[in-house]
Image: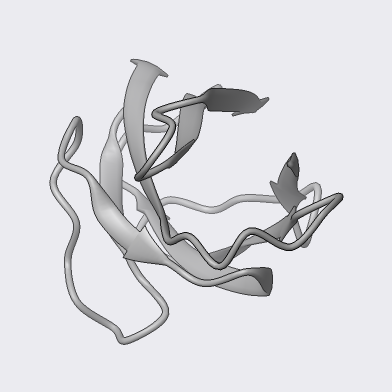
Amino acid sequence: FTFTGGASSPNVYTDEDTNFVFDLNEIAPTGTDYEMKYSIQQGGGTIKNTLGNSVPALIWDDVALGNFIWKFKPTASGQNTLKFTVRNKITLQEKTTTIT
C-alpha cells in the first residue's frame, strides 16, 4: 500500500485548525482495514479525525482508503513536527510520513 500526507497550508497558526491531508491506497485491493496513530516530535497541539473526534497521541484510530483529512490545532508557537504511522490491521505492515 501507499501512504502520503501533508499540511494543506504552509502557514500554521497557534489555536487555529490546520488540515492535514492524507492519501492511503492499495496497489492491489486486499479488502483489509487500516488504522493510524501519530506522535508529536516537536511542538504541541491537538488532533481531530475525519469525524471530528479528538485522537490522543500514540492511539490507533481507524482510517479509510483514499483521501482523508485530520485537523491539527497547534498549542505551541514555532515549529511543530508530527509523525503519522498507518498500518494494515491484518498484516501489521506500517508506513510513516512526517509533517513539519
In this picture, residue 12 sits left or right of residue 4: left
Q: In front here: 4 or 42?
A: 4
Q: In front here: 25 or 17?
A: 25
Residue closest to the far top? 41
Residue closest to the far right? 27
**Which x, y percent locates residue 37?**
32, 39
* Residue 33 picture quarter: bottom left
**Which x, y percent locates residue 26?**
76, 54
At 19% from the left edge and 77% from the top edge, which residue is drawn?
A: 53
* Residue 54 picture quarter: bottom left
At 82% from the left edge and 54% from the top edge, which residue is drawn?
A: 28
Where does the N terminus fall, quadrant-wise? Answer: top right
**On screen, 82 above or below 74?**
above
Q: Is residue 43 visible?
A: no
**On screen, 69 above or below 80?**
below
Count of marks placed on residues: 0
Q: In front here: 44 or 27?
A: 27
In this picture, residue 56 sits left or right of residue 44: left
**Which x, y percent locates residue 38?**
35, 34
At 32% from the left edge and 86% from the top edge, which residue is drawn?
A: 51
At 15% from the left edge and 40% from the top edge, which residue is drawn?
A: 59
Protein image colouring: one colour
In this picture, residue 19 sits left or right of residue 45: right
Where does the C terminus fall, quadrant-wise? Answer: top right
**On screen, 44 above or below 54?**
above
